[in-house]
Image (cartoon, helix red, strand yellow):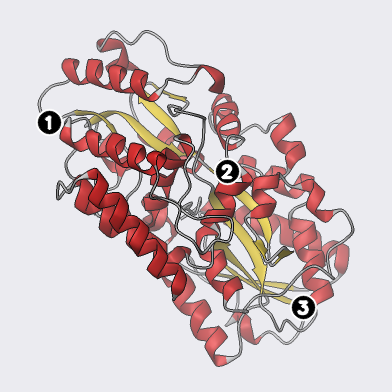
Amino acid sequence: MSAGGVAAAPFALGACAGFSTSGDDASTDEGGITFTTWGTDAELAGFRAAIASFQEAEGATVTLNAVPYEQMFTTIDAQIQAGNPPDVFRVPYYTFGSYAGQDQLLDLTPHLPEGFADRFTPQAWQAVQREGAPYGVPHHTDTSVILYNEDLLSQAGVASVPTSIEDAWSWEEFLEVSRRVKGSLPDGAWPFAYNWQGNGVTRWLSWLFEADGRFLEDDLVTAAIDSDAGARAVRFTQGFFTDDLVPPNSSVKSSTYAADIWYSRTTAMNFAGAFLVPDATSTLDFPWGATFPPRDVRSAGDFGGNALVATKDVRDPGLVARFLDHVTEREQMETFCAGASLLPTRADLIESGIDFEVRPELAPVFLQQAAAVLPQDSGQVASPSMSAIITVLQDELERAFVGGRGVDATVQALSSGIGEATAR
């Protein structure tokens, strides 16, 4: 589950299973730093490279404990409960808030070097804040764009796709393209699939943000989705199902992920994160490219990816802070993101760009789209109540998409459910 998000993408879960640990239970190491994470082979290679350079520079040991994603947070929670958590662990932004909100993480304010925040984009730095203080560092991000089957779009007479975010299709133009594609496809195939399955339901929020809406007010407690923008986002996305533009089995509670559907050539387009690029390149036997998601009032995107956090009672906060500083230095982050096809959170790397090791020509599409995420968007996703809000989104959107419930009733149910989630 690389891109976390929300960021993390459910399709990658299977790829994360089965990693062995580096040594015994990392939480029992008496010296140095213990670090627990999940990751693809490329991600783990990037972490090991950063650890090696840190150990050489500091003369300190970092014990890496790599676990399957599906075991990650039950392991962390059990260790926190038992009083022997790792010093550092990796966490999706949408889960960050629950740990920070329960006072389980280290406030890094007194331990980070002066000006540390300036290296990150505003939206990335906002995603690791609790009450104005950093309780983690934004290690990387990801966001979804449209991957498209060149043959199927050409067959439908779609001769070109947007090549800059400013020229992205509007919502209406995207529907027009999708209907044109639908008319050229055989029975049992659909124009596109959206990657909102499982915890990826947070990606639905991109449509809300594109309509210039919010689901939480600035206080991160008051529900804000009962609005014209909220209704517009629900109505538009419900139309994917009522107009037969997406597979019926691609709803938010489906066990079939959008990428699987696209791989089978059942759809012409697929919303997907950059983390999917290496696997798609090695798996697909048809020509494909990437373009920008549609825009409404503004462009927006899901803020996927993961932060690195330190548990509250680490033995050596200064050493841990130097490790977090090291892994987010330019060289370390560039190497990690290029190798794993993920997006950097450093502003200088966003500006200069990075080259993915696989399909480097696609990196600018993802980087431009990631820049459309606003700090107010990422800040809401990092709410302490986000884990409970995810369940509300899953339940209420499923009733709209599959159950056919009306737009107004859905928006009211979302508002009520979000309000209850933040009051817990």
Q: Which residue is mark 3?
A: 32
Tell me the kind of residue under disc 2: Leu
**Is disc 2 surrounded by few (<14), some (14 to 19) or many (20+) residues within 10 Å?**
many
Residue 308 is marked as: none
Could you tell me residue 207's position as x and y percent?
41, 38
Residue situated in front as seen by the camera: 330 or 98: 98
Residue situated in front as seen by the camera: 164 or 331: 164
Q: Which residue is mark 2?
A: 342
Which residue ends up furthest to the left in the rendered image? 187
* Residues at circles 1 and 2 in contact by the CB criterion of under 8 Å: no
Q: Which residue is mark 1?
A: 188
Left or right: residue 291 versus residue 79 is: left
Q: Quadrant of residue 55?
A: bottom right
Could you tell me residue 380's position as x and y percent?
54, 55
* Residues at circles 2 and 3 in contact by the CB criterion of under 8 Å: no
| Vertical side of 282 occupied by 307: above or below | below
Which residue ends up furthest to the bottom in the rendered image? 82
Tell me the kind of residue under disc 1: Gly
Could you tell me residue 422's position as x and y percent?
46, 68
Q: Quadrant of the C terminus?
A: bottom left
N-term mark: 3 or 1: 3
Residue at coordinates 21% horizontally, 48% vertically from top-left? 400
Separation (CA) of disc 1 from disc 2: 33 Å
Separation (CA) of disc 3 from disc 1: 56 Å
